[in-house]
Amino acid sequence: MPNQISKDSSKSALLIIDMQVGLFDAPQPPYQREQLLSNINQLIAAARLAQAPILVAMHTGPQHSAIAAGSPLWQPVPGLDLDLQQDQLFNKTRPSCFEGTSLAQQLAEQTIDRLIICGMKTQFCIDTTCRSASERGLAVVLAADAHSCPDGELLSAGQIIQHHNQTLAGAFADVQPAASIRFGTPSQPLQCGERA
């Protein structure tokens, strides 16, 4: 049964991007991957307390590819605190979580106007989805310490993350540490780590 937003919760949803075995356990793993996983799980816990939907984008290759839907490398990271009975998984094939997917329709049907974004990879799917969401009129919150990537050829992963946090802040997203992100209504805010 899909998550429903109660009248007492905010119109926020958590969007987790590409937290998959093939990326997380790659030969060049994401920067500070254990902290990344911990911070995303903290966001998941806060979203559940606020009864905010949890949307999970899975990068998907063609049939018979290494990341075909259902293949071992396509699977969600085992340590991710997902509930596959209620969290909403969807496939994507492009850097934007909106292109060629039903994400915009899902958000509209659930009257979500604020998207909290985390996952991988910073300079590709995180960056593109933040910009795409902003262009669609959504309020975007980027969890500054809950997105990652491996080192690049010219910049370290830490530099790439810092650059995108600075570049996306203001024009495309409200950039905050995971522990500061609130999912609840203004009258009853819920913060990561708080208990109802």
Image (cartoon, helix red, strand yellow):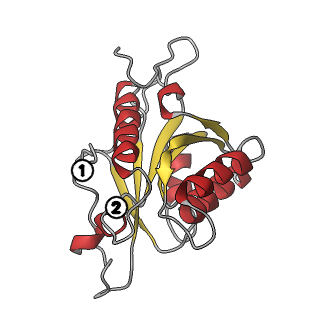
Q: Which mark is residue 47?
A: none
Where residue 139 sits, quadrant-wise, is: top right
- Measure how far apart labels 1 and 2 are at the Cα level: 19 Å
Where residue 99 sits, quadrant-wise, is: bottom right
Using the image, determine if residue 66 lies above or below residue 125.
below
Picture residue at 40% right of the left edge, 32% below the top: 47
State left or right for residue 98 relative to residue 25: right
Q: Residues within 10 Å of mark 2 (few under 14, many from 20)?
A: many
Picture residue at 27% right of the left edge, 56% below the top: 77
State left or right for residue 16 relative to residue 114: left
Using the image, determine if residue 46 lies above or below residue 164.
above
User: Where residue 104 appears, x then y in whole percent?
Assistant: 56, 56
User: Where residue 25 appears, x then y in whole percent?
Assistant: 30, 65
Who is closer to the viewer here, 63 or 121? 121
- Specify the quadrant that holds the N terminus: top left
Query: Which residue is denoted by mark 2 in the rendering?
Result: 24
Q: Amino acid at mark 2?
A: Phe
Q: Amino acid at mark 1?
A: Leu
Q: Residues within 10 Å of mark 1 (few under 14, many from 20)?
A: few
